[in-house]
Image (cartoon, rainbow, N blue to C red):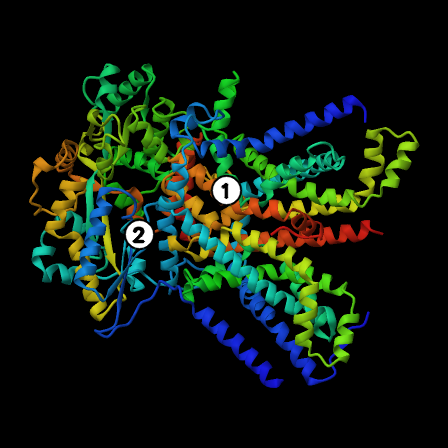
Amino acid sequence: MKKTKIILMYLFLFIMAAIFAMPMLFTLLSSVKTKIEIFSEPFALPKIIQWKNYVEAWNGANMSRYFINSLIQAGATVIILVMVASMAAYVLSRFSFRANQFLVIFFMLGMMVPMHTVIVPISYIIGNLKLTNNIPALILVYVAFGLPFSILVITNFMRSINRSLEEAALIDGATYFQIYYKIMLPLTVPAISTVSIFNFLGAWNNILFPLLFINDKSLKPIALGLLNFNGERGSEYGPLMAAIMITVAVPMLLYLLFQEKVESGLAAGSVKE
Amino acid sequence: MHMIKLKNNNARFFVFLFMLPSLVIYLLFQILPLAGALYFSVMDWNGIAGSPVTFVGGKNFLEVFQNKDFLIALKNMGTMVIFSVLFHTPIALLTAVVINTKCKGYRMFKALFFVPTVFPLSAAGLMWYFVFMPTGAFNSLLSTVGLGGFVTPWLVNQSTAMNTIVFVNIWAGIGYYMVIILAGLTTIPEEVHEAAAIDGAGIVKKFFWLTVPMLKSTLTMCIVMDIIGSVKVFDLVFAMTGGGPNGLTNLPTTLLYNETFKYKHMGLGSAIGVVILAICLAGTLISNAVVKHKSD
Amino acid sequence: MKLKKWTALALAGVLAAGMLTGCNASGDNGKTESDEKVTIRLLTRMAGTSTQVSIFNDVLEEFKEKYPHVTIIDDSQSDEGAFNNMLSTCIASGDMPHIFRIQGVANLSDYIDNGLLLDVSPYLAEDSEWGGGFSEGSLAYYQVPGYEGTYAVPMESGLIGVYYNRELFSQAGIETFPKTWDELLEAIDKLNAIGTIPIAMGAQSTYMAGHLHDQIFYKWVGTEAAKALGSRAMNWTDEEVVQTLQYVKDLIDANAFDQSAAGITADVAGAQFQQGQAAMMITGPWSISKFTDVEQTPVAEHIDVEKFPYFKEKPEFKLDDMQILSPYMISGKLEGEELELTIELVKMLTNKEIAKRYAEEAAFLIPRTDIDLDESKCTELFIKNMEIGSTSKGIGVDVFDFDPLSSMQDRTRNSILSIFVNAAAEEAAAEIQAEIDNAYD
């Protein structure tokens, strides 16, 4: 490629990089500075690294509690979702019955429903059935909203799996359950991991449903807990920045570890929640 | 492709059993609330348990469209959708093409551009809030480089507030579309590029006359996803301004939340929810039609 | 084979049932026999790191020791938003905590009708040592027109005044704290001249903007007018009411606040005052313990307090003041041992002895007339606040307290905030009035 083209290209990349990195860099730097430093020299390196900001965020502001909550909530969501969706996907991809077409479309419809539309009825249900702070109910709502996408992806993937193994197994007298468990699941691992990561991130990053369900501070997930921290002690910038870093750490790590999975999942024609 | 027919009760039972959990959860936790949303949108309720829930028909919808705050929210949504689409796809396309050249350090750039999309939007919003707040990093930067005249409370100033939030949304979404386009780019076989090069096509020509047309369906999909995605934005506005000051930066989603939880206008809130649903449905259906049409 | 399937089904069913009934519902209104565990749930604003909160927690501990079979769940929130959120959810489900608070008075009738509030008057009468010590005015505040009885136990009171920095004032050449509005405007000019922010204002936390307006309101039209607005004898679009909003705009135009006040939170504004960058701050006795702590407030020794200036055209309202008055409300759905224990806890939190401790250690005032105060233990600032607060003739908390519409809290505050971003006073007034009109069609 010609020289000028290369220079232009790198210029473009660096400008973009600057804009992209700016807030992240600022947050990272500020998370280890004192309050005065944050304001007087926003982009300079700290004189002394204030690790205590992280300690304060983790303990004093309860980020540790929120972190664990998110882990539990997102983790449970994924486990249940994968189980339930893969079961449905197996049936939908392999068995012909009248309701099959209908069910597929029925689940597809769910992808078009935004979470916000159901704010009022869900709060009503929460109120009447006394489901406030009921984490299992919250998880089931996450699962419900994650079903359409997950079933779609896993069903499509299963459809493309070669049936010869299953047919051989059937001839050998295997039950459908055994086929599901011993053949389909292992072969569907790629789709399952994509679905898992997606829904894990979706649950980790969600604040809308936790806002509706959870009052108890000790049960809040991290994305919401962070905002709480800001609401209560919004002028303690150091620990706040540290809290932001903690909040984004897990999604960032997940991405860096599973880069290809995440990216291929997107390309699988997904709709962002 | 043969599917298994349900020949015996064993099979039937199995199908039933395996579909059951999904169906139950889906019905209880998504379909039922959806029906509830439609129900509440034609009712009037003040949010206190035991208070009456009365039927009011289309009154809530009439109110919604006459409500000044809703009209502002709708306008903001329009701004959000238009500018997001306007910037996301082109910039993502450009970035994807550049990264696709696998120049030095491309992996790093790709990761950098993509990482914001996996952040919780509330954290991203908060991050940028500290940059744009009156005493934040951006104003400091402006003052330091001598552009102090531009210092303004970005998130509160009528003319800049919504645009600032849209900017952050754009920032948070580019990586997402970039990756999708990248995947699309890799499906364009090398031979096509080489053939074009032999024919003497310059880079820019190649880009517009070759790359873009081949990516048409991917790009269309991106735009469609962008439109629907922008309608659904909530976390970002909630974290940065809560919809304020006084409803200035509301989107229908945050307005819904505020009307329901702060002002207790449950019927109104539900009606807004149904309107958002209608917009999303319309968007999806139109896009499906467009995609079908294009792929002929 | 079949057995395996049925077991699987049964297992799934049990799991589902178990999950739905949930292990986490902290809204447990446990019915009890005397041996069983009793749970008492609190939802107050007593949370955070201040001294009054630690005293509050001490009382809870004491209670727990006295009644080991009682579990106390304290959901108290210091952030107003989080608190309101939680409260709304409880109200929507009718699942009230045992002890909580609702701001406002006129909208209490809805709650009383739904059985959510306990009438505490029999208990006040029965235990005269405890009940008789509360000031008349504070109890009267929680008596709702149309209903017999008193619906809350007052637990906090005190003047909301203007705290100011004497040092900055003398630097600006202001000798005495402005007594009238005109003098206030002059003082603002002088403070601007020395480059200080005259009044710390974090309007993004809408309550701060609301409190500013409350102060102006009571001095221009008096505290009774708030009741008139609530009973609809007056409208927000009446000339005098619009004038109160106009005065807010006048202050903004006079540069009384930071240019970006609308984008700053109360936290940040408070920090400006505490660091000596702003000369005045409208706040209440809850800030006193912070202001007297040199670590949190480097300029602590310079801080003094005075009443908000009055309008020389309206001397009749000179003693109409804004005061804070906060309640403990008790759920109307309690019975038996639960009810008794809850009442006892409230007594422990508001009796003469604890009031003394609150005042001396935390500059926190419970409106009792029988506090045996050792003034030498209190900070000067607290005593000054009490002194000037005792001369009030008319008392008002927030103007919207008397409005039966619960949405008025946010509506008025947001509309006042809009004045900070260039709305006209008339617009704001019309916006507020529209909320009222819409609710009644």
Q: Nearest to the eye among marks 1 and 2: give it.
A: 1
Residue C82: x percent and y percent?
A: 38, 49
Residue A61 falls in which quadrant of the image?
top left
Residue bearing the label numbered 2:
C76
Q: Which amino acid does label 2 sit on?
A: Ser
Specify whether disc 1 shares its chain with disc 2: no
Badge 2: chain ID: C
Foreground of the two, A113 or B59: A113
Whether residue B155 is visible here, answered yes or no, is no
Determine whether, in the image, residue C276 is placed left or right of residue C411: left
Q: Which residue is drawn at 35% across and 21% down?
A: C254
Task: Quadrant for the N terminus of chain B, please.
Answer: bottom right
Q: What residue type is labelled 1?
A: Ala
Q: Which residue is drawn at 35% across and 40% down?
A: C236
Residue bearing the label numbered 1:
B123
Q: How crowded is mark 2: few (under 14 residues within 10 Å), some or many (20 or more)?
A: many
Q: Is residue C73 above or below residue B235?
A: below
